[in-house]
Image: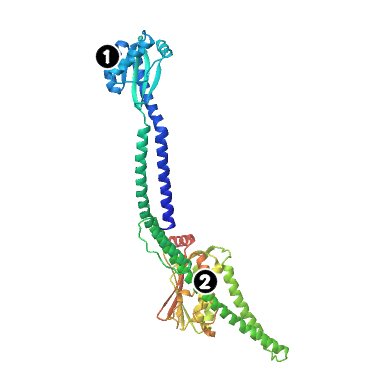
Amino acid sequence: MSKLSRKLILRIALVICAVCALSMVANTFLLPDYFLYQKKLKLGELTSQLAVMDYRELVPQIEHLEAEHQVIIVYASLSDTTEGVNSWLKERLNRKGIALSKFWLTEESIAKLREGGRVNKIYNQSKLKSSYLVNFFPVDGNVFAVGESISHSSDTIGIVNRFNAYLWFGALILLILLCAVYAARIVKPLARLNETAEAISNLSFTKADIKTGDEIESLAHSINRMSDKLEDAHRALEVKNANLRTFIADISHELKTPLSLIQVYASGIKDGLDDGTYADVIRKQSEEMAVMIDRLLELSRLQTELYRYEPIDFRQLLAETLDAYRPAFRQQGLTLEVDDRLQTEAWVSADRRKLETVLHNFMTNAMKYTTGERVGITVEAQADSVSFRIANGTDMAEEAGWESVWEPFYVMESSRNKKFSGTGLGLSIARTILQNHQASFGVHVWEGIVEFDFSLPLSRRCGLSENAAREA
């Protein structure tokens, strides 16, 4: 039996035992007093009703009152002596089947009744194991006694307590058995959940198959969802760690090469071997290192830097960016084809400098990595957004890993030849910026073509401009 089952059964057993003990104590010490109190209260109310009645009215109704209230009513004249009054009362009680060994009204009690007062007595008949409760009251010079026999309750209460003890003991055994059954039904699923949680803590992302139809099943579903999310996060972390290790190796290589060249050419200058180009080589290598370091700093800065949003005409910003890149495309022998489907201005709320960085990264990647002779750009307005797409040819369309191109330090070409060299930071920078602009973005590869796209929500200014255009 599990600890939880033992704890549950023990606590329920203690509660039942405590209730049983309290019940017996109440029956033994409180019930007799409460029973006597109720009898006195009942007899007192009846006495109060009879005391206001006339003698001639009361006497004919005695039998009816006795039958209705289950009491005995007798009377005697107060003009008689104390002994005479007691004799008359005892004789009339005997006629009605009430034989009392102890029954007596003292002279003080009779004097009080003659003055109009009431006397209440309880006579203990120990041999009969009963008591007789009597209320005496005067009516027109006569004393009336209203009495009721009360049996001693100690024996009865003892029997009741023993019966209750048997009853509670049986209930305790039954409840223990039921608790054992239900506890097992509760504990077994919890044990499976504990095993699942233990496996998850050991990075074994298992699931618990529990069908109880209650909160335990809901808990199992929550743990299963947590397991899936932790597994996804663990895999993503492993990918990032692998990318980080690759990046450290690559960046070490990228930094080591220019540093080695700088050292070699600096030594050549020191040894007098400079032919006039050594300083230029050192400067070029230093600049390449500075660019790489700047990219790292830019990615780090974008994580915490504040964005300054302002209304920007995306169509104008794109036109300025394309004008800057057209000469570079011509030098590379590439054709830049632009499909501008915007009918008017397209205003978006953005940080202009950072949005320019996104466009520059996409344009640079397309120009650098295309294997064709053309790069296509499409820009159009949707219902509530403006979308930008840039596509170029690639000979890596069949390769896996495109979904990771947004990750820091990731490069598609693992050999890192000069044609595909890079730090893998450009698209990570673009992703960070687009996420902060609440933009949707993605990459799609098909039939030797790779396409990057993003969509920015249109601002209200765009809607106002379109309305003004329609009115014109």
Q: Quadrant of the N terminus?
A: bottom left
Which residue lies at the image location 59% right of the left edge and 73% below the top edge? 296
Q: Secondary structure at mark 1?
A: helix
Q: Which amino acid is tagged 2?
A: Ala
Residue closest to the eye, 57 or 212: 57
Locate residue 270, reporting x and y percent: 73, 88
Q: Earlier in the sequence, mark 1 or mark 2?
A: 1
SS class, disc 2: helix
Category of crowding for the residue at label 2, using alpha-carbon neighbours closer than 10 angstroms: few (below 14), some (14–19), many (at least 20)? many
Q: Nearer the viewer, residue 87 or 324?
A: 87
Is 71 or 393 nearer to us in this picture? 71
Q: Would residue 384 be seen by someone viewing this image from the given angle? A: no
At 66% across and 83% down in the image, what residue appears? Answer: 283
What's under tag 1, amino acid-wise? Pro
Q: Is residue 199 above or below residue 100?
A: below
Residue 471's disc is none
Work out whether 127 lies above or below 201.
above
Relative side of 181 to 351, left or right: left
Q: To which quarter of the image does residue 62 belong?
A: top left
Question: Residue 5, located in which quarter of the rendered image?
Answer: bottom left
Mark 1: few/some/many CA within 10 Å (<14, 14-19, 20+): few
x, y (%) of residue 74? 31, 16
Mark 1 touching mark 2, by CB under 8 A?
A: no
Q: Which mark is residue 60?
A: 1
Is residue 301 toward the left or the right of residue 375 in the image? Answer: right
Residue where numbered disc 2 is placed: 430
Q: How is the image coloured?
A: rainbow
Query: Alpha carbon of mark 1 to alpha carbon of mark 2: how far?
Result: 112 Å
Q: In this rendering, does residue 347 appear at all?
A: yes
Q: Position of residue 315 (x, y in %)?
A: 49, 69
For the residue pair 240 and 260, the one nearer the viewer reads as 240
Tell me the quadrant of the picture where the C terminus can be found.
bottom left
